Image: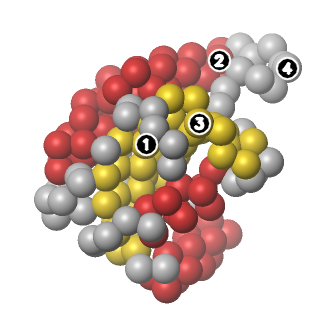
């Protein structure tokens, strides 16, 4: 089963995705994609790691190339988040944006249930240009490709889940 969770900044999408994954039987993996740049980010990551462990998640830090990630077969995995992964693949010297969708497909082949959290883009009402526009376009294309593959797509707005595709939760 593959669930794509989409929403704007601070919409409650991560909390929803965590609760969904916690409701599943079996091992729970949290695939974290935020790179630890600076002391503030490192402290935030440490807090999140501790909180997730208390909720029954094993955290795996993975910033690029999901296809090389080895996880236990049949696990329930939550990938947080696609926006970070896309930025890492697009802007890191060792990254490759073309690997994102195949990387998700790799995880799908291993997971009992995969939940991917992603950002809703292009509703900010602002004109973007240059590398920012390129990033937004790439992420939007990845979101479309993954929504087509997903069994269920849920948009979270103000903490409220709205089913866009698939069976009710």
Q: Nearer the viewer, residue 120 or 25?
A: 25
Residue 90: image location, x then y, percent: 45, 30
Q: Secondary structure at mark 4?
A: loop
Label of residue 90 in the image: none
Which scheme is used to colour this image of the protein?
secondary structure
Which residue sits at x=43%, y=42%? 3
Marks 4,2: beta carbons within 8 A: no
Label 3 vs 1, first from the N-terminus = 1
Q: Residue furthest right?
A: 125
Single out the mark in the foreground, 1 or 2.
Answer: 1
Label of residue 163 in the image: 3
Label 4 vs 2, first from the N-terminus = 4
Single out the mark in the foreground, 3 or 1.
Answer: 3
What is the spatial separation of the Cα atoms under label 3 and label 4, in whole angstroms?
A: 24 Å
In this figure, which residue is indicated by the disc labeled 1?
3
Q: Nearer the viewer, residue 63 or 58?
A: 58
Marks 1,2: beta carbons within 8 A: no
In this figure, which residue is indicated by the disc labeled 2?
133
What is the spatial separation of the Cα atoms under label 1 and label 2, in whole angstroms?
A: 26 Å
Residue 53: image location, x then y, percent: 45, 81
- The quadrant holding residue 83 is top right
């Amino acid at each position: 089963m593959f669930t794509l969770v989409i929403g704007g900044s601070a919409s409650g999408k991560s909390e929803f995705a965590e609760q969904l994954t916690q409701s599943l039987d079996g091992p729970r993996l949290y695939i974290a994609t935020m790179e630890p740049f600076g002391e503030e980010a490192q402290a935030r990551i440490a807090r999140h790691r501790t909180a997730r462990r208390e909720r029954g998640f094993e955290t795996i830090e993975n910033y690029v190339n999901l296809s090389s990630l080895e996880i236990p077969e049949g696990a329930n995995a939550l990938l947080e988040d696609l926006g970070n992964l896309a930025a890492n693949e697009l802007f890191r010297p060792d990254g490759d944006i073309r690997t994102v969708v195949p990387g998700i497909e790799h995880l799908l082949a291993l997971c009992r249930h995969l939940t991917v959290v992603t950002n809703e883009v292009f509703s900010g009402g602002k004109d973007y240009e240059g590398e920012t526009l390129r990033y937004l376009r790439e992420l939007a294309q990845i979101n479309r490709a993954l929504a087509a593959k997903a069994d269920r797509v849920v948009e979270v707005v103000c903490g409220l889940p709205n089913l866009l595709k698939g069976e009710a939760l």
